[in-house]
Image (tube, helix red, strand yellow):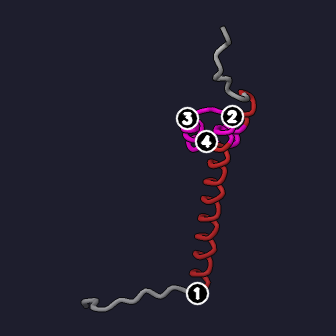
Amino acid sequence: MILLDSHLVIDTKVLEILGILLLIIVGLFLIYIVRIHIAYRMAKNRHRDPLPWVLLSFFFSPLITWLLLLAYGDADNRRPSE
């Protein structure tokens, strides 16, 4: 017997659950992006180069980055007066 036509039937409950899971994943991704942006702003406000801090925040944890930025404080780029 040769199968000429096939139909995939998905229950509406499965579609609802998949939709909810997709919304949760998108929401968590957006929250993560906001946390990385906070690390960017913290580095910028402390006169530090934001790129390494954003990368640290992306690959490890935004919370760790925030704590490190708080511990290091403001970058002092001023030269001592002669």
Disc 3 versus disc 1: distance between alpha carbons?
A: 46 Å
Residue named by callout 4 = 57
Provide the residue span drawn in magenta: 42-66
Q: Is residue 67 above or below residue 16?
A: above
The local crowd at label 2, few if under 14, some if 14 to 19, many if 20 or more residues have their Cα within 10 Å, is: some
Query: What residue does disc 3 label?
Result: 52
> At 63% from the left edge and 74% from the top edge, which residue is drawn?
20
Residue type, label 4: Ser
| Quarter of the image with the C terminus in it | top right
The residue indicated by pointer 2 is: 46
Vertical placement of residue 38 versus 46, above or below: below
What amino acid does circle 1 point to?
Answer: Thr
Q: How far, Cα to Cα, is label 2 from label 1? A: 51 Å
Mark 1 or mark 4: which is in front? Answer: 4
* Kind of residue at disc 2: Arg
Expressed as whole percent of the image width and height from the top left, the position of residue 34 reads 65, 54
- What's the distance in space between the residues labelled 1 and 4, CA to CA? 39 Å
Are circles 4 and 3 on residues that touch, CB within 8 Å? no
On whether residue 72 falls in the magenta region, the answer is no
- Residue 81 position, x and y percent, is 68, 12
* Label 4 environment density (alpha carbons within 10 Å; few <14, some 14–19, many ≥20): many
Count of labels in the image: 4
Assign a secondary structure to mark 3.
Answer: helix
Spatial CA span between label 4 and label 3: 8 Å
Q: Earlier in the sequence, mark 4 or mark 3?
A: 3
Instruction: Give the numbered dot on residue 12.
Output: 1
Work out whether mark 3 precedes mark 2 in sequence or the reverse, and give the earlier one.
2
Q: Secondary structure at mark 1?
A: helix
Q: Residues within 10 Å of mark 3 (few under 14, many from 20)?
A: few
Give whichever of 17, 79 is nearer the camera: 79
Quadrant containing the N terminus in the rendered view: bottom left
Q: Nearer the viewer, mark 4 or mark 2?
A: 2
